[in-house]
Image (cartoon, rainbow, N blue to C red):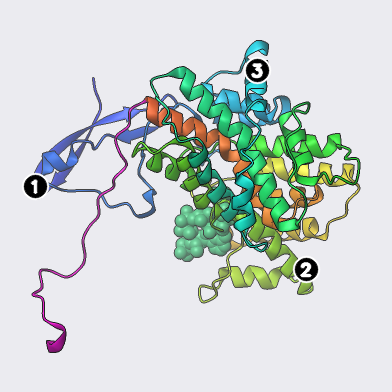
Amino acid sequence: MSEKAILEIDGKKFEFPIIRGTENEVSIDIKSLRSATGGVITLDSGFKNTGSCKSAITFLNGEEGVLRYRGYAIEDLAENSNFLEVAYLIIFGNLPSKEQFVKFENDIKSESLLNEEIKNIIDGFPKVAHPMGMLSSLTSALTAFNPVTVDINSEKELYHAVVKILGKFPVLAAWAHSKNKGTPLNYSDNSLDYISNIMQMLFRIPTEKYRLNPITVEALDKLLILHEDHEQNCSTSTVRIVGSSEAGLFASISAGVSALWGRLHGGANQAVIEMLEQIEKDGGDVEKYILKAKDKNDSFRLMGFGHRVYKNFDPRARIIKSYADEVLKDLNINDPALKIAKHLEEVALKDEYFVSRKLYPNVDFYSGIIYRALGIPSEMFTVMFAIGRLPGWIAQWREMRLNHEPIGRPRQLYIGENLRKYTSINNR
Ligand code: CMC
């Protein structure tokens, strides 16, 4: 027997099918709502209750703190896999065989050279430009250097677009960083694995031999695995909605970078470290900042706290917190920000304001402390998040296109003026 939901409007009943997901999540299919009711719409500001698509990529249970990519627990993947293997899993649906992985890695490496003319664009940016702004523009510029439209019915063309963006995006990110620092633009070193190559592009200078530290490479690898996908968040929804107009992969991802930049989303990692520095400079008075965060007349929010979906704990934050301890110990770093962060968390988690609103540390609360330990400057934190999230954006764009989803175009409830008669400027 099929399940249905019944909606009553002005005494008239309408039935809508109930659709369940593979984890028994329940949704009401309101596809026929407008036509059946003669124009009634749903109003859901911020899409807090709206499922925008069906997806087989990531499962997230915010009440129980569960996150899985293609059915694999995030904890299992962070412990045992590596960034590129997880990228393959997310994008193509299954863990790669050894041969598939080697081919995937080599295909990405063969796409890691940028057109030299991209340097002209970099030259045009002011030195103070934020790297996220540069990354978004440079990703968009890739469309100019690769103007051919991908035929999404061709698996080969799709695959080629995927390895191309995975090869070029970290180079663009590293070059944005070099622009800020005034250091030479490093090329990819195809003898290295994906994460080691990112490290050398960020930090190698031509006058010195660059030695990779296996601790920092492993730390970055794990951190980026935890960022790879997070279902229909703000930037991913942006990528999908841009792509739904049949805009290409690179243009859609450029829009995703811009969406990620905001401090309520990926930009929170930079905002957290700036907040911790501010608290430290201010004498380390954690209670004062908790009071500020609770004060509705104060715009201050506890950055790195709260989440739209997680109402118990963010499993990524749990892994990153324990990992921050380990990495700082291994690298022999004593960062006062970690102490302040732990103190903030301890006080907040006992405070009625945070408890009643189910506000817990999110992925961005401790990640900046690790990035800082790896020598990554705070303005690059969100760029690192973007490198991590790239496979998720690609997978969601690909799924959306392969499912032939319709163009994303929400409705609205108009609350403006009724029809008015124009009056000429002399009579106003
Ligand atoms: N500090 C103080 N109060 C908060 C915070 C916070 N960080 N987060 C939420 N609240 C309060 C909020 O004021 C509201 O209170 P009330 O019910 O009295 O009006 C209540 O908690 C519910 O918050 P909301 O803003 O309606 O919740 P939301 O789901 O719309 O927003 C959020 C989620 C993540 C934007 C928000 O919690 C926030 O601004 N957090 C700080 C920024 C941050 O850390 N963002 C990273 C999110 S996770 C990674 C990612 O997405 O990239």
Does dot 3 land on a helix, a strand or a loop?
A: helix
Q: CA distance from mark 3 to mark 1?
A: 59 Å
Looking at the image, which is closer to me, 360 or 416? 416
Looking at the image, which is closer to me, 350 or 175? 175
Name the amino acid type tagged 3. Answer: Phe
Is 36 left, or right, of 363 in this rendering? left
Q: Which mark is residue 379?
A: none
- Residue at (54%, 72%) from the top-left corner? 299
Q: CA distance from mark 2 to mark 1?
A: 61 Å
Bin the neighbour count of mark 3 within 10 Å (Cα to Cα): few under 14, some 14-19, many 20 and up.
some
Does dot 2 land on a helix, a strand or a loop?
A: helix
> Which is more N-terminal, label 2 or label 3?
3
User: Magenta segment: does it hold 406?
Assistant: yes
Task: Say if 164 sits above or below 1 in the image.
Answer: below
Q: Which mark is residue 101?
A: 3
Residue 199: x %, y % from top left: 77, 40
Name the amino acid type tagged 1. Answer: Gly
Task: Say if 152 sits above or below 53 in the image.
Answer: above
Residue identifier under label 2? 280
Q: Which residues are magenta?
A: 403-428
Q: Which mark is residue 11?
A: 1
Residue 173: x %, y % from top left: 65, 45
